[in-house]
Amino acid sequence: MTVARVWVPLAATLTPANRADNEEAPHVLAELPEGVRWLLGDVHYNDPALREGWETDGTALVTIWYGRYPHYDDGAPVRRVFHQLRSHAIETFNEQFKAIFDGHQQVPTRGLIATRRMVLGAVFAYQLLLLYRHERGQDLRVGLKACLRAA
């Protein structure tokens, strides 16, 4: 889960590929701070139980809907705008994160625990780097990999 102009991870986990997103989401979403108004998720988050749990807390879960496109219900134009934004932002974030931490290659670890430790450690290092650069008024999108390597 991320928020803001520069996507800062607010909650993260790493699960095996055979673990469904909608099963893991309640554990991750429980870590979000109060005041989150919108949760943008892909089609795997379009789960009635997940939606019910979050919309009762005043948080709107905006997900892609199943079925043929285009959709014509009242919420379709809003979902389209949010998901276009989400798609551009999250793909940019994913690419930047993978570039910084050499994520285009196979991880050098074996097993879920070691891999989880490495990936979530990278997320934490990324958060610290953004905080460090923010406090110094530096660009939060340029020079991150060089800054980490110099550390």
Image (spheres, rainbow, N blue to C red):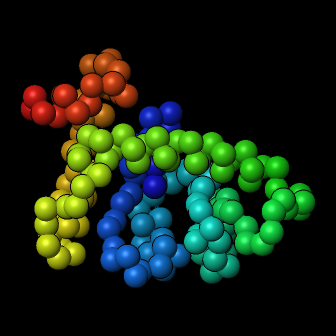
Relative image position of residue 74 (x, y in whole percent): 89, 58
Residue pushed farthest top? Answer: 137
Left or right: where 57 falls relative to 76: left
Q: Is residue 130 above or below residue 105?
A: above
Given residues 87 and 35, the one toward you in this image is 87
Q: Is residue 9 above or below residue 5?
A: below
Location of the C terminus by quadrant is: top left
Q: Residue at x 67, y 66 (%)?
A: 55
Given residues 92 and 130, the one toward you in this image is 92
Left or right: where 111 falls relative to 67: left
The reply to whether residue 127 is visible in this rendering is no
Q: Residue at x 59, y 70 (%)?
A: 45
Left or right: where 20 falls relative to 44: left
Q: Is residue 136 above or below residue 30?
A: above
Relative image position of residue 36 (x, y in whole percent): 56, 51
Q: Is residue 30 above or below residue 126?
A: below
Relative image position of residue 144 (x, y in whole percent): 26, 31
Relative image position of residue 5 (x, y in whole percent): 50, 33
Left or right: where 148 falls relative to 59: left
Given residues 16 and 124, the one toward you in this image is 16
Q: Residue at x 49, y 46 (%)?
A: 91
